Image (cartoon, rainbow, N blue to C red):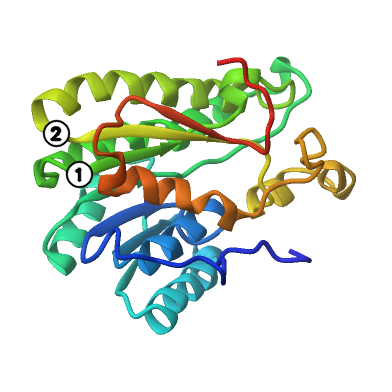
Amino acid sequence: MDPRPISDDPNYRASGKLLDKVAIVTGGDSGIGKSVAICFAKEGADVVIVFLRKEEERDAFETQSIIEERYGRRCLPIRADLRLEQNCYNVVEQTIEYFGHLEILVLNQGVQFPQKSILDITEEQLDNTFRTNIYPHFFLTKAALPYLAPGSSIISTSSITAYRGTNLLVDYSATKGAIVSFTRSLSLQLFADYGIRVNAIAPGPFYTPLIVSSYDAEYVSHFGCETAVHKAGQPYQIAPSYVYLASDDSQFVSGVVLHINGGINTQT
């Protein structure tokens, strides 16, 4: 990508909000997930970043390097296909084996395949989109739950498309709406009885590799123009909202979706 997304905010001043906690961040090799992983490390957390493809290894190792060399925290990159339930259990087991505990689960993995018509969405695409974007929320939560103590936090990445829709991403938007319902329903199960907070963030337009890989240069050049500042956000600008939901600052917050979208009215 040219220019590259800005993943790390040099002006961010940490205060140990996540000191010695362990977080799993799916899709943590790039985009929003990368910035979240870095910001968590700044706040004192050790991080597991999960990525899918062999070609994403370089990004994952770059993120690992920033976390370990720049901020002095440990980082465990894991390549795993989270569409398969057993792989999700393997990720959690590797996390516990490596770090010994787990407090934060960030469910951020996602794919999108723009189509101008629902008639062009094949069964294969539909299955891939749902199996990637929503199935791991169930699989990883089930795997992680035995290790999450009161005060732990589960955070999902939904999308502004769950509220406004988008004509090019009908299947993707449907999965992001499912994440909203997942968040609200799981919070009802876990917050009162187990003390585990379950929240989500609905990003608006952010400049990430997912956008550049999904659309042509003309579309990308106008991406984000509907925000109040007429441009897309940078990944580092959304990462502190994940810190808030992961830290004790949000100890009375559960079942909530935070809208970080540059001033776009989602009419929620």
Splitting the image into 4 quarters, where does residue 137 fall? top left
The residue depicted at 24 percent of the width and 60 percent of the height is 22
Q: Is residue 35 above or below residue 71?
A: above
Mark yes or no: residue 85 visible. no
Q: Is residue 134 visible?
A: yes
Q: Is residue 202 left or right of residue 150?
A: right
Residue type at mark 1: give it: Ser
Q: Are marks 1 and 2 in contact (CB under 8 Å)?
A: yes
The crowd level at tag 2 (other Cα within 10 Å; few <14, some 14-19, many 20+) is some
Q: Is residue 33 left or right of residue 26?
A: right
Decide: few, some or many residues near mark 1? Use Cα within 10 Å; few <14, some 14-19, many ≥20: many
Residue 193 point in image, percent of width and height: 9, 25
What residue occupies the far right of the structure in this picture? 218
- For the point 32% across and 61% down, the residue is 48
Image quadrant containing the C terminus: top right
Q: In this picture, is 229 found above or below 159? A: below
Rendered residue at 10%/31% (across/down): 194
Q: Measure the C-alpha gap from mark 1 to mark 2.
A: 7 Å
- Which amino acid type corresponds to the residue marked 2 in the rendered image? Gly
Q: Which labelled disc corresponds to residue 195?
A: 2
The answer to which of 168 and 66 lies nearer the viewer is 66
Q: Which mark is residue 116?
A: none
**Residue that badge 1 annotates:** 152
Towards the viewer: 119 or 59: 59
Q: Position of residue 164 (x, y in %)?
A: 65, 19
